Image: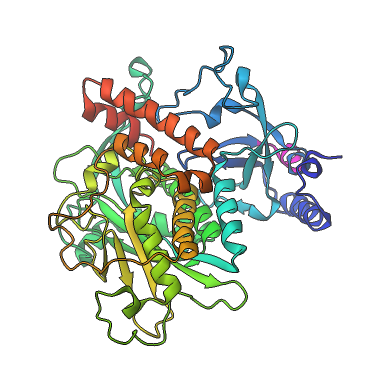
């Protein structure tokens, strides 16, 4: 019996897919395959296998050191895996034991920037064929399964801001005499001066880099809709068509990985760090548009036919159906606990400033970009949705989306009712979003409903890794240098 059989995922259809992929690899002359999987931070890790080994791994898996799932943002292991008892909360990880990666044959894609190279998405499993609880992709799959039991699905569209710079000197990063853990970032210059939102001239200045992003996204099969110049210097935005949540999260991982690699080969440095370490920059956000659909019909349950009688635009039921209003209330009720899963870096909290198109308080508003939750649409509009503006582009998309689902579903099940919407999102007196990572982690730990939904093992794993990052940042003498090395060079 193959390892895939022991995991309970292999059947006749998967066997056919494996055989078709093996033939395709041979016919296309694929020389190597990268087997990639997503770590706790939403970054791709992977191995490069020769074709015969990759085909074998489709059924039998391939080993990976388990500590790769225990790393903080500097790649330092957050558990002392060689000390007796130190991994009692992590069964199967003592002694840096192996896990097994199992590729999905349906995920195969040829990398447009790396000729002769294929790619397969994997998920980690324990050697006995049981799933790894804190595999972040599995966390989202579990959340979607909970939603599906209600006959519902989650739909979202990616809208991602990030920065692209031109490399001027890679010496700081690649000089062996300056190697460190983590190392220095490269020297860069801007691709456009900024402060002219969606400026046509700015687009032309950045054309070469944007074309690389375009070719990469389309070559990976991502539904790119637009590339735009954002307000900040060297800042851009990519917008994608809406799709189901798992597909969208997979696309976010591929976008970040592919854009960084393809741009690097062409002499650029892309970063999804929220606030790059330069003066006069603008923060990057990841605004998660979301709606909930009936699985049977595809109908958007956030839509209402006409505004409720006696309502004003400040009432949720003016725009949203009852299910949408309950979902909105769930997101508000769990907002503090959602924060570290949407903004998981020390750096990202610098974005929560007044009058900066970023939220500060736990509020919703109708088409209001200063509110945490922006309700978009109108009665009868099939595209009615909620935009959560809490996120930064460095977030793990699987964890971010899973948390939204559990929070919204809790509001739906309990019939929570949202307060009136805001017209003054930066006014004093409203409950605030946590303004630092430590408080945000404490809020997550204290939210028993969200901990139960996500799984205590996942929350403990996430919080311990982030706490180690937080403590190292607190101990750093030069906080800016910490963020340059930890985030700008690696995210």
| Outermost residue toward the right in this view | 1
Residue at image coords 52%, 38%: 456
Location of the C terminus by quadrant is top left
Location of the N terminus by quadrant is top right
255 w.r.t. 94: above or below = below
Residue 210 appears in the picture as rendered = no
Q: Main secondary structure of the magenta part?
A: helix
In which quarter of the view is residue 46 placed?
A: top right
**Relative side of 477 to 442, left or right:** left
Membership of 52 in magenta stretch: yes
Front position in the image: 94 or 427: 427
Q: Position of residue 390 (x, y in %)?
A: 32, 53
Residue at image coords 53%, 53%: 250
Q: Position of residue 246 (x, y in %)?
A: 55, 57
Residue at image coords 29%, 45%: 274
Q: Position of residue 412 (x, y in %)?
A: 47, 65
In which quarter of the view is residue 345 placed?
A: top left
89 w.r.t. 311: above or below = above
**Relative side of 319 to 45, left or right:** left
Q: Position of residue 19 (x, y in %)?
A: 80, 52
| Outermost residue toward the top in this view | 83
- Residues rendered magenta in the picture: 49-55
313 w.r.t. 52: above or below = below
Residue 285 appears in the picture as rendered = yes
Front position in the image: 352 or 338: 338
**Relative side of 319 to 36, left or right:** left
Membership of 430 in magenta stretch: no
179 w.r.t. 27: above or below = above
**Relative side of 46 to 201, left or right:** right
């Amino acid at each position: 019996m193959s390892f895939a059989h022991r995991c309970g995922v292999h059947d006749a259809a998967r066997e056919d897919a494996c055989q078709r992929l093996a033939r395709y690899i041979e016919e296309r002359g694929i020389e190597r395959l990268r087997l990639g999987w997503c770590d706790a931070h939403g970054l791709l890790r992977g191995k490069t296998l020769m074709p015969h080994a990759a085909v074998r791994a489709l059924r039998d898996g391939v080993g990976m050191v388990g500590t790769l799932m225990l790393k903080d943002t500097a790649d330092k292991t957050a558990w002392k895996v060689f000390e007796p008892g130190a991994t009692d909360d992590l069964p199967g990880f003592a002694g840096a034991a192996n896990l097994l990666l199992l590729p999905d044959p349906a995920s195969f894609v040829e990398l447009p920037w790396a000729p002769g190279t294929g790619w397969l998405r994997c998920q980690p499993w324990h050697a006995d064929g049981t799933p790894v609880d804190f595999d972040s992709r599995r966390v989202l799959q579990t959340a979607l399964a909970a939603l599906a039991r209600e006959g519902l699905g989650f739909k979202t569209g990616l809208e991602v801001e990030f920065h692209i710079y031109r490399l001027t000197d890679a010496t700081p990063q690649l000089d062996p005499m300056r190697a460190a853990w983590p190392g220095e970032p490269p020297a860069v210059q801007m691709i456009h001066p900024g402060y002219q939102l969606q400026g046509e001239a700015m687009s032309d200045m950045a054309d070469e880099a944007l074309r690389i992003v375009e070719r990469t996204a389309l070559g990976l099969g991502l539904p790119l809709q637009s590339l735009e110049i954002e307000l900040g210097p060297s800042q851009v935005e990519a917008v994608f068509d809406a799709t189901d949540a798992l597909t969208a999260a997979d696309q976010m991982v591929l976008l970040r990985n592919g854009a960084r690699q393809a741009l690097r080969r062409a002499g650029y440095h892309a970063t999804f760090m929220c606030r790059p370490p330069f003066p006069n920059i603008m923060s990057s956000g990841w605004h998660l548009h979301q709606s909930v659909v009936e699985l049977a019909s595809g109908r958007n349950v956030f839509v209402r036919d006409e505004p409720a009688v006696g309502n004003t635009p400040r009432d949720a039921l003016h725009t949203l159906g009852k299910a949408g209003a309950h979902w909105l209330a769930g997101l508000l009720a769990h907002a503090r606990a959602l924060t570290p899963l949407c903004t998981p870096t020390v750096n990202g909290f610098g974005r929560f400033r007044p009058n900066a198109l970023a939220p500060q308080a736990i509020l919703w508003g109708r088409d209001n970009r200063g509110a945490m939750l922006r309700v978009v649409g109108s009665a009868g509009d099939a595209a009615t949705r909620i935009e959560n503006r809490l996120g930064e582009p460095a977030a793990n998309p699987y964890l971010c989306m899973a948390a939204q689902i559990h929070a919204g579903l809790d509001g739906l099940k309990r019939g929570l009712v949202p307060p009136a919407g805001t017209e003054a999102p930066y006014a004093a007196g409203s409950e605030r979003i946590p303004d630092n990572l430590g408080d945000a982690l404490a809020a997550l730990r204290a939210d028993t409903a969200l901990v139960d939904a996500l799984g205590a093992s996942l929350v403990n794993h996430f919080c311990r890794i982030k706490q180690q990052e937080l403590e190292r940042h607190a101990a750093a003498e030069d906080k800016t240098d910490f963020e340059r090395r930890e985030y700008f060079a690696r995210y």
